[in-house]
Amino acid sequence: FEAFWGADEVPQAVRAQQGWRWWRERRWRDEMRTHRAGLLPLARNPYLLLMLVAVQESSGGLPQNRGALFEMFAETLLLREGLASRTDAGEVLVNAEGQGLLAALTTLAFTMQAQRGEAGEREQQAVTALGREVVFPALLSERQGYLARCATLLEGEGTIRFSHQLLQEYFAARYMKVELEAGRLPAEAIWQRTEPGKRTGWEEATVLLAGLYSDDCTRVLEWVEGVNPEVAAACLVRSGAGVNAETRARLQAAWLQRLTDVEAEPDPRVRAAVGRALAVAGLDNRRGVGIGADGLPDILWVEIPGGKCQLGGDEDAYDDLPAQEVEVPIFWLAKYPVTNWQWAAFVADGGYETDEWWAGLEKPKPDDPSWTYGNHPRETVDWHEATAYCRWLRARLGYEVRLPSEEEWEKAARGTAGRIFPWGDEYVSGYANISETWSNQKVGPYYLQQTSAVGLYPQGATPEGVLDLSGNVEEWCLTNVKSGSPVLRGGSWSPYAQNARAASRNHFLPALRLSYGGFRVVRPAPAVL
């Protein structure tokens, strides 16, 4: 499949079309390169590939997004069936019968879509069909059904369905546009603000709806962003529609505010959805989260004062150290764990191909994270990879960078007084991304079941401002115990509250990758920031 998209050759299925010529092949290549991001994935399906060819041949080009593509495809089929005509200026005029057919198909699609949503189906490509007795004559006349089948828009006799699920989504989007412009389609009727991430079956239709506003989809974004920011982000990225700079800037400001405003958004599940939207849309420009202008990770260093501190001695912690007082020199710790965006800079700079970073380490094959959102902590990396990353970053920044020692990590989390958690001595629900609902240690109602945008829990900060030391991902440390098994600290999205205690410790083999294991970096003294 990847070779297909990267090749210059026209697919054989396209060349086989009657009347294909060499100059059409050149035009095909030009069109596919121009529309690679938005339309190429459709060509995986034979029916949608036929759609691309039909529209390109009929109009001499392809639109910039899928919503407009389906609109042009419907017009092409109506032209073929004599239900529309094209003016000398190239405008398509649909006659009365054609308009009636489009209106009926729009109502049919919305009816099917609404039934699917009510059934709670989660598979976007689930087949939706209605019995003939339901469709005729209430939704379509027999004549309209005949015309729709001739135009290959519908199929089936005993049960009626659209020829492709995306056709149904497109006609549902047409219905949504009418209702939206009439003020009869509240987003709250489709999605529940308190259930972010729950699919209702209307997500793809909404992306196509945004595409119907080709020049500027602001109206759709304003309609959906407050209730379902992830769908709004999908509209921004996948619809192919334009959006004015003011709308984009307003969305960015609003989402960044919601991300950490625990008074306005006390439910971390809602804020986590906002974080995912910011990542998908590429709008999370917080310091310390992404990449700087130099292409290197933008690490936001937090000074941790030197001095004595309490280690261990927490009887309720998991595998804590014996109680002891130690002296730890001043150091600077990254405010957040290393994010997916920051890890990608290492990979893009040849991180796995440069032997210098891997001397004395076991180099694995690169692997993908469990969650690819750019502002989430990078997980599914082993201790060797984390160490190689530090060596690379040290060389690029020109000063010492490494994993924190256990003593440094615990001092940052507990301070000089030996706090139990980074924020204080008691666990508070909603202060960290952990499993609060664990049956034996239930401490609250929240369990995201995945990583979240770094910094999502500002209440969980240390007095110095370090975030995510409890929960989200466990963090590899420099310290080794028990036959070379490095320590991980801080708990994660998966374990319960005991693991999130600042004195709790885990240790695993250094080559082990965990969906809940990440790391952050430290800059030891001497350092001038």
Image (cartoon, rainbow, N blue to C red):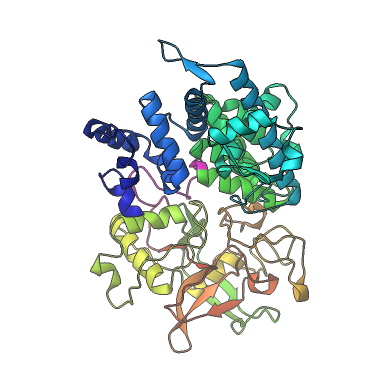
Q: Is residue 79 visible?
A: yes
Q: Is residue 33 above or below residue 417?
A: above
In terms of depth relative to the viewer, which is nearer, 65 or 134? 134
**Magenta span includes 282:** yes
Q: Quadrant of the N terminus?
A: bottom left
Residue 470 position in % (x across, y down): 61, 65
Q: Main secondary structure of the magenta part?
A: loop
Q: Image check: 520 left or right of 126?
A: left
Quarter of the image where one finds residue 462:
bottom right
In terms of depth relative to the viewer, which is nearer, 333 or 386? 386
Q: Residue at x 73, y 49 (%)?
A: 266
Q: Is residue 418 visible?
A: no
Residue 254 position in % (x across, y down): 61, 35
The span picked out in magenta is 281-299
Q: Image check: 491 left or right of 72?
A: right
Residue 440 position in % (x across, y down): 77, 76
Quarter of the image where one finds residue 217:
top right
In terms of depth relative to the viewer, which is nearer, 371 or 259? 371
**Magenta span includes 7:** no
Quarter of the image where one finds residue 103:
top right
Residue 233 position in % (x across, y down): 56, 40
Looking at the image, the residue that sits furthest to the bottom is: 483
Q: Is residue 172 above or below residue 156?
A: above
Q: Residue at x 75, y 27 (%)?
A: 184
Q: Residue at x 52, y 19 (%)?
A: 84
In terms of depth relative to the viewer, which is nearer, 252 or 497? 252
